[in-house]
Amino acid sequence: MLDNQATQFTTLSNGIIKAEVTKNINIEIIREQIINSFSGSRINRDKIDSICEAITKSESPLETWKTLLEELRSLAEYKISDDKPIQLPETKILSDAGLNEGNRQKAAELLKPENWLSMMTQEIDFEPSFYYSTGNAMEDTIPFSEASAGQQATALLSVLLNQEGIPLLIDQPEDDIDNRAINDITQNIWAAKNKRQLIFTSHNANLVVNGDAELVVCCDYKESSQQTQGEIKYEGSIDNTEIKNEITLIMEGGEKAFILRKEKYGF
């Protein structure tokens, strides 16, 4: 179930966020089970930590845990007898973790099949890990927590816009979004408008104009000198002359500034 949700989350983010579940096993549950099973064996905590590390650092933690369970089962079922030499079963994970023959013999004496069965039936939890796809040619990823605020905001906004649901209200997304990502976001807005109502508060012309807003509401102070009480100054479509003038003035810095940029860019 978590795997399916992780895949869905990656899809909703347009591949920007990679979610991984199976490699991030909740080791604390396993650690507690091992400590309880080895109680009285005098196997120190460092060796138990080494066993846990072998699980968490493996390519497939769940498969390594299953292998360890088989090793513990073989010890639990092994019968030590005074009339025959001790030939303990092979236990690679335990041996690699530093458990010598004496440790494993003591574990075999203490472990009972019911102990192993309890470990076998213990539900194991997984904690998703999230990574940010840098989008470079090498398809590198970094932990999502290490991505910039702009990268994180862009990715999460993509997830929100790609979902159906109740009206979505987003306050000034341009504060966090990288300017280079605005075009991608506006394309997401076009698709999202068919699935849910979108309400943005913004000072960014690209979101309003390129996002093809159906209704633009321009707000202002009732008394500009006091700047305390607000009012709706204009509302309507972008085709409305008053709305166009407000967008040009507030978002583009005025008509002269807009024309000057146009001339400098050579458009």
Image: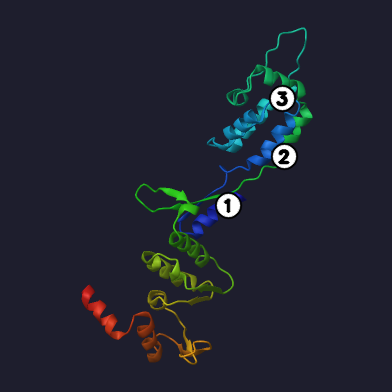
- Asked which quadrant contains residue 25, the reply is top right
- Asked which quadrant contains residue 114, the reply is top right
Residue 129 image position (x, y, % from top left): 54, 49
Which is nearer the N-term, disc 3 or disc 1? 1
Residue 98 image position (x, y, % from top left): 60, 23
Q: Which mark is residue 42?
A: 3
Q: Nearer the viewer, mark 2 or mark 3?
A: 3
Q: Amino acid at mark 3?
A: Arg
Label 3, label 1: how far apart the Cα atoms are? 42 Å
Q: Circle 1 — which element?
A: helix
Mark 1 is surrounded, within 10 Å at the Cα level, by few (under 14), some (14 to 19) or many (20 or more) other residues, namely: few
Which is nearer the N-term, disc 2 or disc 1? 1
Q: Circle 2 — which element?
A: loop
Q: Residue furthest top?
A: 83
Q: Nearer the viewer, mark 2 or mark 1?
A: 2
Q: Which mark is residue 37?
A: none
Residue 11 image position (x, y, % from top left): 50, 57
Mark 2 is surrounded, within 10 Å at the Cα level, by few (under 14), some (14 to 19) or many (20 or more) other residues, namely: few
Mark 3 is surrounded, within 10 Å at the Cα level, by few (under 14), some (14 to 19) or many (20 or more) other residues, namely: few
If the image is split into quadrants, where does the C terminus sit?
bottom left
Q: Residue furthest front?
A: 226
Q: Amino acid at mark 2?
A: Gln
Decide: is 256 above or below 58: below
Residue corresponding to mark 2: 122
Q: Which mark is residue 4?
A: 1
Q: Circle 3 — which element?
A: loop
Residue 35 image position (x, y, % from top left): 71, 33
Q: Amino acid at mark 1?
A: Asn
| Drawn side of residue 176 relative to residue 95, left or right | left
- Asked which quadrant contains residue 115, the reply is top right
Q: Residue at x 26, y 77 (%)?
A: 261
Label 2, label 1: how far apart the Cα atoms are? 22 Å
